[in-house]
Image (tube, rainbow, N blue to C red):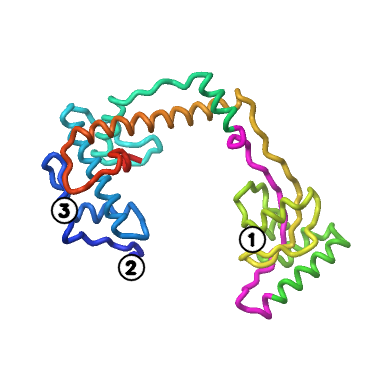
Amino acid sequence: MSTHTLISPKPAAATIKVNGVVITPEAVAAEAQHHPSTRPEAAWKAAAEALAIKEALLQSARHHNVEIGAGKSEDGVETTEEDQLIESYLDSKVTTPEPSEEESRRYYENNRAKLRSPDIFEPSHILLQADPGDEPAFNRARNEAEALIEHLQRRPGKFERMARDRSDCTSSTEGGHLGQVSTGQTTPAFESAMRNLKPGQLSDRPVETPYGFHVLRLDQYQAGSIPDFEQARPLVEEFLRDASWRRAVAQFVSLVVGEAKIEGVELSGATTPLVQ
């Protein structure tokens, strides 16, 4: 059975027209599935706006005899003829300048922290799975983790062997080694514990996560760094191009929508839901 919540057509909804072309309630209901919201009326409104704007663009593109371009997007995904037509239309009408060195340097200086590479950790762990709903088993897992830590503090060279023998993680076959992980790739508690360790250090207490209790050791750590301007320049220029393109598209769509006679839906700003 589908887990999607179907949004039924509104029986009392006003008929939506774009230059006389009707957008049916059934089409809006189908489109609403792509605009998830906790309020059905919000999803309906977003879908109606999106379809009205799309129809205005399609009509304008056909009026200007735009030819359909390639059948795939840049990432190789197949696209519909209508999407191809809109893409070709935007490509033919929207142009943006290349970012200047001055603009790129200004963005770089104002966003240095965002350009910082992520911290890299190389942890090893022994996982003792534990269900918080099973209090006796949960306490046993914690006690065993504490006992393992106490033992490894005296005999640190036994970590890999104990991971192979006792860990409930698939990393046990690698002696508990998890390889390289970066910020945000582990649970908050696990990451916090890693940040409090120095390379080669074993945590002095079990780390509790939704998976159970971890005996944690940090093997290596490499702090992230901010690249110099020349290193960051390609990424900065790509971001500026994309931002410039989006602004130009929004302005162009606003003009196209402004020239169309749209009934049954009030467009907020006329540029909101466009082509992703």
User: Residue at 26% of width from left, 30% of height from top?
Assistant: 89
Task: Point out which mark residue 124 bears.
Answer: none
Q: Quadrant of residue 137?
A: bottom right
On screen, residue 217 versus residue 31, left or right, reads right
Which amino acid does the dot numbered 2 rest on?
Answer: Met
Please name the residue that numbered disc 1 is placed on.
Answer: 170
At label 1, counting other C-alpha atoms closer than 10 Å, the crowd grade (few under 14, some 14-19, many 20 or more) is some
At label 3, counting other C-alpha atoms closer than 10 Å, the crowd grade (few under 14, some 14-19, many 20 or more) is few
User: Residue at 80% of width from left, 70% of height from top?
Assistant: 147
Placement of 185 over or under 226, stated as above or below: below
The residue mark sitting in front, 2 or 3, is 3
The reply to whether dot 1 and dot 3 touch (C-beta < 8 Å) is no
N-terminal-most mark, 2 or 3: 2
Residue reaching furthest bottom?
Answer: 136
Please name the residue that numbered disc 3 is placed on.
Answer: 14
Task: Point out which mark residue 1 bears.
Answer: 2
N-terminal-most mark, 1 or 2: 2
**Residue stretch in magenta:** 112-138
